[in-house]
Amino acid sequence: MKSREKRLGGVTIRAVLIGLLFVPINVYLVVQWETVWGTQYPTTMSIFFNAIFCLFLVTVLNLIARKYIPKSALTQAELLTTYVVLITAVTVSGHDFTQGLFCSVGTVKWFATTENEWMSIFGKHLPEWLTVTDEKVLQDFFEGESTFYDKKHIMGWLEPMLWWTFFLTTLAVTTIFINVLIRKQWIEREKLTYPLVQLPYEMTRENSATSFFKNRLLWIGFGIAAGIDILNGLNYLYRVFPAIPLRYNLGTQFVEKPWNAMGSFWVQVNPYAIGLAFAIPLDLQFSCWFLFLFWKFQRIMGSAIGLNLPGYPFEDQQILGAYLGIAAVAIWMGRKPLWQILKRIIGLASEVDDSDEPMKYRTAFVGTILGIVLLVAFSYRAGMSIVFAIAFFLIYFTIIFSFTRMRAELGPPLQGIHYSGPLQLMVALLGSRGISSQTFTAAAPYWPLTKEIRNTPTPFQLESFKLAERSGINTKKLWKVIAVITCLSVFLTFWAFLQLNYKWGGVGAWRGVSAYTTMERWITNPVETNYNFLIATGVGFIFVVINTFLRLRFLWWTLHPLGYPLAGYYHFEKLWFPFFISWATKMIILKYGGIKLYRKAFPFFLGLVLGEFVIGSLWGIIGLLTSRPTYAFKSW
């Protein structure tokens, strides 16, 4: 009975309201950073430093309350509910989920010229209910020095705002249903590690919160990271202050063939990345930095043997194939539990029990199907062919399913696919000649949404369920809160985006231009089936499958298939060295001190993360107050 009561806690009115207090400023700040200034980019990370900063503030205040007014103090479940509200809002407001799509809404009408012939190519296909075409509304939007709070501006954007809010909310809620179907398998049966939930969980633990913040190693790590960021932040604003250099490009030393083929080769020290990587299992740490060197080796060998293929070694396409392989392997490995879930859905005798799930499996399954149907119907009404829409969303959900698996098992600081998403795969497979210009017009707003897919709500939703499982949050209430906050945050992001654009003029417009330029190229210069793209995708798929087989067959095989797509992603070149440092440190600690020393050292590495996240957030707030860009600790 006691455990039952524990599972029914956390989602209280005060916890949700505290989270909501932080939502508007965080959404506004994210849009300011990512669209106006082009700096910080918190939502391109797998853990949001601004959300951790807010949780840090609430937790510290709660410790004071626990000391002086203990009856009013929040429980860990309530603190983590506040955090879930925050990460839901931030991921929805992100660079690759809402902002890029919004940049495409008024693009065609404003940027059409006689040279690009956009009005003749796209104009007749633009859905009026999703697009702004009023020239006066667009002029003030793209030129700035105006205000969104004008009746004509509001009415001009109202209908597209409502429809795109519906689309993005449906997309995010559909992934909640998918997560319910895999939650028990990945959280309770396989017991995946979820490294990215370690910091918020440890920070808020009721039986150790005080000792966590009193831990000397934590504050040593915090001080090192914070000191570096304070000094470098002052140097960014005032050159009289010295800076601590954190990176060097070794690639500049390799100027002769074949070594120059590997391109940039950054040796970079990011304290937060070292700290985050420390929570990752040892074999995964090793796989990430080792496979990064393997990607470089592919480039060098290609140059050495004179392989002259543009785009070789096709990293982006191999990464896409690897993620498709991860999805296939995860489904195959979980086929028996999935079969039991299916039996429960159709009413047959089943071994699984869904009484403690956020919702019944049948509800989750019907919700998933209904969500996909609504998304396809939305796209069809916008002008996309039904077959194209179905294929697009099946590929998209497969990719984010793989992303969610990687986050649950590996927990990297970042992940993504660079310009090799669903649209590129479909064009590579079918060629663009057989796809209508009407379908391409309807697909253009989806281009910014899927060109890198660096932030999608799906992994954060499952991590929220993991936090709920560990701290006793009522998931039957939690998923509803996530759904409501999602809808609210989409609308808030639209508001912040429009307000800042009418103030500054056309910020982030290049994203919409890039989308329609790509569609224009496919329409006016049709391409045939891209066999190099497809072969490289197949290679990435096969690599994952073979590595999975070897890991299952041979205990001594240490390479993990999840490391392959992460190591090949172009931003990881800035993080491979922190992974190497963390792996070497962790290996030495475990070898000579065992698990006891590892647990003792763990707060130091959490301190590295917390120190950079707190000071990085403070620099962002200072930038917001002074209306000027400030130091970005990420460096990628």
Image: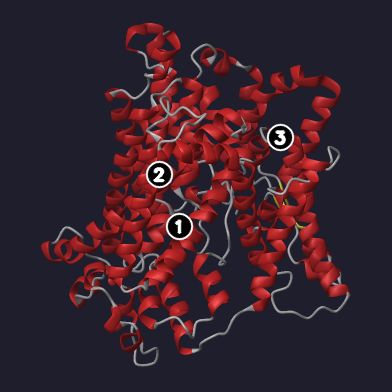
Image position of 150 (left or right of 474): left
Q: Quadrant for residue 18, please give it.
A: top left
Q: Position of residue 359 (x, y in %)?
A: 37, 33
Type of the residue with mark 1 = Asp
Q: Position of residue 112 (x, y in %)?
A: 33, 84
Q: How is the image coloured?
A: secondary structure
State the residue position of label 2. 365
Query: Which type of secondary structure does the marked residue at label 2 adopt?
Result: helix
* Residue at the image point whose x is 26% and y is 67% from the top: 130
Q: Quadrant for residue 271, please give it.
A: top right
Q: Earlier in the sequence, mark 1 or mark 2?
A: 1
State the residue position of label 3. 281
Estimate the spatial distance between the alpha carbons at disc 3 and disc 1, rounded to whole Å. Answer: 28 Å
In-front residue for pair 274/462: 462
Query: Which type of secondary structure does the marked residue at label 1 adopt?
Result: helix
**Dividing the image into 4 quarters, which one contains the C terminus?**
bottom right
State whether residue 142 is above or below residue 41.
below
State the residue position of label 1. 96
Estimate the spatial distance between the alpha carbons at disc 2 and disc 3, rounded to whole Å. Answer: 33 Å
Image position of 528 (left or right of 585): left
Type of the residue with mark 3 = Pro
* Residue at the image point whose x is 64% and y is 18% from the top: 216
Q: Of the residues tagged 2 and 3, which is closer to the observer?
A: 2
Estimate the spatial distance between the alpha carbons at disc 1 and disc 2, rounded to whole Å. Answer: 27 Å
Asked if the residues shown at circle 2 and circle 3 are in contact, with their CB atoms under 8 angstroms apart, the answer is no
In-front residue for pair 635/543: 543
